[in-house]
Amino acid sequence: GAVVSQHPSWVICKSGTSVKIECRSLDFQATTMFWYRQFPKQSLMLMATSNEGSKATYEQGVEKDKFLINHASLTLSTLTVTSAHPEDSSFYICSARWNEQFFGPGTRLTVL
Amino acid sequence: GQQLNQSPQSMFIQEGEDVSMNCTSSSIFNTWLWYKQDPGEGPVLLIALYKAGELTSNGRLTAQFGITRKDSFLNISASIPSDVGIYFCAGQLGGGGNKLTFGTGTQLKVEL
């Protein structure tokens, strides 16, 4: 139980384009999902908390207009990186709450 | 954002050896969690601790919730090659829905 998936597992895009990453809880419903960003050889940094049916809560320093989060159902949250630039290249990981937080496998974003 | 301090930063040990790592915080947490992350993957929950002083085991892994609620320890006994990876501690103030604060990570390498 408590399986979380992400799609795509990796994506390469041109600078200025937008990229959508999906996070799904496969065998449970999650009212709360979290989005993290991890740069090479660093720890996970929370970007935002996604609540089903309401606006996401962003951490200080994270641009909400650049990182759009939608939690439309109890099993799906999406993160859209708008007008991506090379500095947005990172490993994006979501988690979903079922007792504790369970993490997806991550999405590697490379912006050229 | 805040990060918890983990030590050591990295360890290179012989197969069969026991491993100890710790995590310290300047603030109190009500829950401590330990995750393992393999390269290119999301973190996997190893052990969750909910009470100050609690000692919990999961196979060869044992973790303790510090009495001061500002630290936690993880021990791995009789290490094997598949123990290789990065171990992260995470602190949480409230229940499962509250956000996690991650440690800086301990990279474990096992020599055959």
Image (spheres, rainbow, N blue to C red):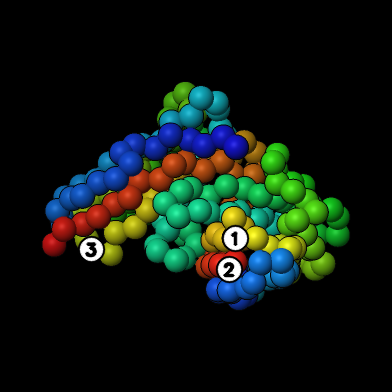
Residue B94 falls in which quadrant of the image?
top right
Q: Residue A5 placed where, x, y %?
A: 60, 72
Indicate whether B19 appears above or below B36. Answer: above
Marks 1 and 3 in Cβ contact (< 8 Å): no
The residue that appears at 71% across and 66% down in the rendered structure is A16
Please say whether residue A29 is visible from this viewpoint. no
Q: Secondary structure at mark 3?
A: helix
Going by the numbered disc 3, the residue's amino acid type is Pro
- Is the residue at mark 3 from the same chain as the one at mark 2? no
Instruction: Measure how far apart labels 1 and 3 are at the Cα level.
Output: 36 Å
Q: Residue B19 placed where, x, y %?
A: 24, 45
Q: Upstream in the sequence, badge 1 or badge 2?
A: 1
The residue that appears at 74% across and 48% down in the rendered structure is A63
Image disc number at residue A86: 1
Binning the other alpha carbons within 10 Å of mark 1 as few (below 14), some (14 to 19) or many (20 upward) gives some
Query: Is A11 left, or right, of A70 in this rendering?
Result: left
Instruction: Measure how far apart labels 3 and 2 are at the Cα level.
Output: 36 Å
Indicate whether B50 appears above or below A48. Answer: above
Viewer-proximal residue among B53 and B101: B101
Q: Nearer the viewer, mark 3 or mark 2?
A: 2
Image disc number at residue B81: 3
Which chain hosts label 2?
Answer: A
Quadrant where the N terminus of chain B sits is: top right
Going by the numbered disc 2, the residue's amino acid type is Leu
Which chain hosts label 1?
Answer: A
Q: Residue B38 placed where, x, y %?
A: 39, 62
List the residue tagged with mark 2: A112
